[in-house]
Image: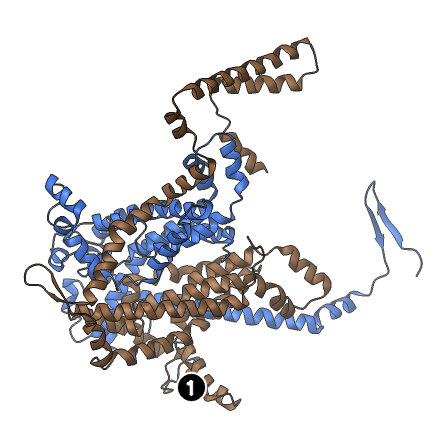
Amino acid sequence: MDTPKVKRETKNRIRVDFERAPLSERLKSKFMSLNFLKKVIYMIFKIVLLVGVSYVILYPYITKIFGSFMTASDFEDVTVIMISKHPTLDQYKYIITENHYFRAVLNTFIISFTVALLQTLVCALVAYGLAKFKFKGNNIVFLLVIFTMMVPQETISFAMSTYFSYFGTKNPIGMILQAIGVIDQGLINSFVPLYLLSATALGFKNGLFIFMLRQFFKGVPDELEESAYVDGSTTFRTFFSIIIPLSIPMLVTVFIFAFAWQWTDDFYVSSSMFFTQSYLDRPDGFKMISSIATVPKSLKEATKGLDMYASAIVGTSTILIAAPLIIMYLFVQNKIVQGIERSGIVG
Amino acid sequence: MDLLNKLLNIFKKKPKERRRIYLKYENASSLPASDDGEQRFSLVVDTEKQEAMALAKQESEPEKKLKKHRLSLNTRKSLSGWLFVLPFVIGIIMIYAPVVFNSIQITFSEISFEKGMQLTPVGFENYIYIFNKDEYFSITIVDGLFDLILQIPAIVIFSLFMAIILNQKMTGRAVFRAIFFLPVILSTGIIDSIDTNSKFFEAMENSQGGVDNNTGDEAGGIVSALDIQNLLGNIKLGTGLVEYVTNLVNNIFDIVSRSGVQMLIFLSGLQSISPSIYESCQIEGATAWETFWKITFPMISPMILVNAVYTVIDAFTSADNRVMVYIQKIYSKSDYAHAGAMAWVYVGIVLVFILLVALIMKAIVFYQRRD
């Protein structure tokens, strides 16, 4: 081969024309190879898998959405499978008006927001203490965190509910509070127990939050804090003005988890824990979002003998319960992935 | 570095005097040497003198106060460590410990609700009862354990697999990620309990679904469990394995919706592996298969341990596994003593199980840095 022909030359770039194989040859070697075939097969496999699993995840919601437009007659008609013949918005209308949807959303939002904020803050504090300070008893505290994670909430639910319902008579602090007149006999039918549990990092899955945040804080280089200490910052100030701004994505992740799990909670706000059934059943009572999952009065007549219709209505209420969460999730889902990606959890 | 500087800037707001001097000193150093510089230098010495005087003043004060102000750095750090974990420690002492104590106490006693709640101690009677007289408890626990032992590896492997796929660069990755993490947020609490009892959902699944139940009378399904059973049976795999796979296929929704958090943890682990390692692998000519087993797997192994333990905890404590359902049934009969005894026996078994898993996993875990 002779020397390549120079096509264009500038100060620091040169373009030369080599003798190349013809286009058809090049394409052939690119697309007819085993390597390319392997790549294509892998791509197809991946896409089928991803789409398939996505379908499995989304399927219940899709069926619920289709079911939410159905009427009673659609369930008697055998030919109707997914798409209603007489689509209506009746189910939404009655659930929203008769089950007090908006009031429930507002109430639940306020409580979930407070609980999630408390849990995020307290778990972050505890996790930071465990991750960055070597003190006597550090390991014991961490083991206790793991222990609270491992004991199912149902195991201690009865003892927990009696603890709070006899708070004013059996607990020394409760007795003092009762003597002052802050509380009645017990802390029943109120959200104070829930807030107390959140403020002491004993709420639902708080062990997991502490664990996740601890791993995250371990990944933050110590030099950051050291430079702050050298400049005369206290540990708490360092935490609030350096660590917190750094870990916003992770904190958002924890906040979303706490919020969503409190939002859909049907364990703490139920007659088995801190509330009595009669209090929850009061018609003008405090409605939580979990209480809207019943068949509204106006549709009771139509659902008689049609179990499918009744559960379709409950499915519709699930959509209504999930809707605010999904909207929130769409806004912050990239933060969740970010927070996790940066955490670098190492066991 | 840019971020570091920005953060440090926050702390430049020092007491006024010291800051001024600091700035002047900086100016002096940036200027060419002159007579002026000398004066500035003396200014700095002045403040040092002032500080020394203040220090001397502090030292001359009574020794008691001095001790208070001058804890060693280690003591101060451990003190603030305790301050950080204080809310949790208070919670443990004030709420959790009494509650756990009480709930264990209940299992050793008989409850009567005549005048408030009365406990009469009866020793191990409740425990003897649940193992000897209750005919379903032992069987349920064995069955439940067996279920979970089969399901846990499936969840861990599935979530690792999906995390690796979701970690690759491709179009629509964000959408798939959003969909995959949806169950973490939505399949909990009330929504989950509605889904598990929904007749409508079941009926829809039977009329439409991709993978149907094991009855095999289905014409419309894309893949039926029976097909898979036949396929695997024909390639002469052991019947146990065939049963296991079909069982997994039937519970695919369960597995997918439970592996959300695990997927997140694996993704974070995959992200923390340095790309330069993969690059050097590529240069050395390793195949994807080799890269996975020699690089990805060892590097991700701590995460496998974390996930295995988390999956065990999650599966054992979730309200819809067999044993928990049974315990809930006893609870709802107001038989608190027996239900509590069962629950604590169950917790004990879970603890042993987690220790076992951790020990087994310890053998394969590889830690990059040992600190």
Q: Residue at x 20, y 67 (%)?
A: B107
Q: Position of residue B158 (x, y in %)?
A: 48, 70
Q: Is residue A29 visible in the rendered structure shown here?
A: yes
Q: Position of residue B188 (x, y in %)?
A: 32, 62
Identify whether A217 is placed above or below A67: above
Which of the pair A318/A175 is nearer the observer?
A: A175
Identify whether A11 is placed above or below A83: above
Q: Residue at x 12, y 52 (%)?
A: A284
Chain at numbered mark 1: B
Which residue carries the number 1 mark? Answer: B226
Residue type beneath disc 1 = Leu
Q: Residue at x 53, y 17 (%)?
A: B20
Which of the pair B301/B179 is nearer the observer?
A: B301
For residue A145, side relative to residue A273 (left or right): right
Q: Position of residue B255 (x, y in %)?
A: 41, 70
Label 1: few (<14), some or many (≥20) within 10 Å? some
Identify whether A198 is placed above or below B151: above
Q: Chain in blue? A: A
Q: Is residue A57 visible in the rendered structure shown here?
A: no
Which of the pair A157/A83 is nearer the observer?
A: A157
Q: Chain in brown? A: B
